[in-house]
C-alpha cells in the first residue's frame, strides 16, 4: 500500500485547482462556499484500492457572473482545462451546462454545473488519499 498526500494537503490542492480555474474567468467572479470542505470515505473505492482512505472535496458558487454569460464562462473554463492537462470526462453542453474533467497529472476531478436558476458552481475533489498520508496511520 503506497503513501499518498495527506487529507490536509489534498484540501490545499482542491483550493489550488479551484483558484487556478477561477483565474480563467472574468475578474467580477466571487467565490461563495456551497458548504465546508468535505471529507468522504473511500470505503467502497472505485480504484480497487484499500479501505480507510478519504476523498476531499469543495464546491463553490461562482457569484458576480451574469447568467446570460454562462455559456461563454463555461467555454472559458473548458478552454483552460483542455489547455492545462485536464481530460474531459463529460461535457453535456448544449443540452445542459455540466462539464466534468480530471487532471491527468494528479487525478483531481473538477466540475462545473448550472443550477435551475442559472447559478454556476465549481467543484473540485481529490482522488482517494490516506488521512495522514500513510496506510493505517
Image (spheres, helix red, strand yellow):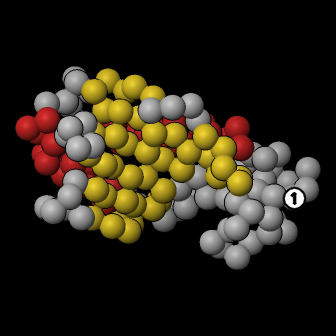
Image location (x, y in percent) of residue 7: 71, 44
Can you say whether 41 is above or below 20 in the image? below
Residue in the picture at 43% in, 52% down: 110
Can you say whether 129 is above or below 90 in the image? above
Q: How many marks?
A: 1
Image location (x, y in percent) of residue 3: 81, 59
Residue in the picture at 33% in, 67% down: 90
**Could you say which is closer to the camera, residue 24 or residue 113?**
113
- Residue 40 visible to an observer of this rendering: yes
Q: As drawn, is 75 to the left or to the right of 42?
A: left
Q: Residue beneath label 1, please?
A: 135
Can you say whether 107 is above or below 112 in the image? below
Quarter of the picture holding the N terminus: bottom right
Residue at the farthest right position: 137
Image location (x, y in percent) of residue 105: 53, 62
Residue at the farthest left position: 68
Residue in the picture at 38% in, 52% down: 111
* Secondary element type, mark 1: loop
Residue at the farthest bottom position: 48
- Residue 10 visible to an observer of this rendering: no
Amino acid at each position: 500500500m503506497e503513501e499518498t498526500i495527506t487529507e490536509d494537503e489534498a484540501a490545499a490542492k482542491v483550493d489550488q485547482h479551484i483558484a487556478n480555474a477561477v483565474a480563467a474567468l472574468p475578474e467580477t467572479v466571487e467565490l461563495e462556499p456551497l458548504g465546508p470542505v468535505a471529507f468522504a470515505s473511500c470505503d467502497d473505492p472505485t480504484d480497487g484500492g484499500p479501505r480507510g482512505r478519504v476523498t476531499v472535496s469543495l464546491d463553490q458558487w461562482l457569484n458576480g457572473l451574469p447568467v446570460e454569460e454562462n455559456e461563454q464562462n463555461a467555454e472559458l473554463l473548458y478552454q483552460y482545462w483542455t489547455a492545462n492537462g485536464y481530460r474531459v470526462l463529460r461535457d453535456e453542453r448544449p443540452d445542459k451546462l455540466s462539464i466534468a474533467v480530471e487532471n491527468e497529472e494528479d487525478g483531481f476531478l473538477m466540475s462545473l454545473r448550472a443550477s435551475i436558476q442559472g447559478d454556476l458552481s465549481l467543484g473540485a475533489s481529490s482522488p482517494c488519499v490516506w488521512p495522514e498520508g500513510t496506510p493505517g496511520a
